Amino acid sequence: ALYAFKTRANWIRIPSIMYAAHACTQMVPILGSVWFDEAVPQGKRTLLASIYLPYFAIPFWLLVHMYRNPVPFPLAIKNE
């Protein structure tokens, strides 16, 4: 995957959508348990949510970006 992003390969779109959807759906119950589980102390909820939130936000951004762009890495147009 790193190779595809480094070389700007468009074939990474579908695997990225699959990964991002999986990561986001896994983080929803984790973040839900952090916020709503009474076993988590009130003072730790914000700390735990701030630690776990990037694991939802970055894949969500990747999902939106790859879903909205059929060609995620368009060729650069040279102005002559």
Image (tube, grey):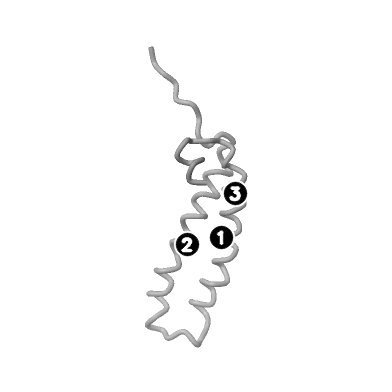
Earlier-in-chain disc, 2 versus 3: 3
In x, y percent, where is residue 6?
45, 39
User: Which residue does the numbered mark 3 point to in the structure image?
Assistant: 17
Q: Amino acid at mark 3?
A: Ile
Mark number for residue 2?
Answer: none
**Residue 20 in the image: above or below residue 41:** above
Secondary structure state at the residue bearing disc 3: helix
Mark number for residue 23?
Answer: 1
Q: Amino acid at mark 1?
A: Ala
How far apart, in angstroms, are the residues tagged by discs 2 and 3? 15 Å
Along the line of sight, which residue is nearer the eye, 31 or 75?
75
Secondary structure state at the residue bearing disc 2: helix
Along the line of sight, which residue is nearer the eye, 2 or 42?
2
Residue displayed at 56% across by 67% down: 28
Residue displayed at 60% across by 47% down: 15
User: Which residue does the numbered mark 2 point to in the structure image?
Assistant: 55
How far apart, in angstroms, are the residues tagged by discs 1 and 2? 8 Å
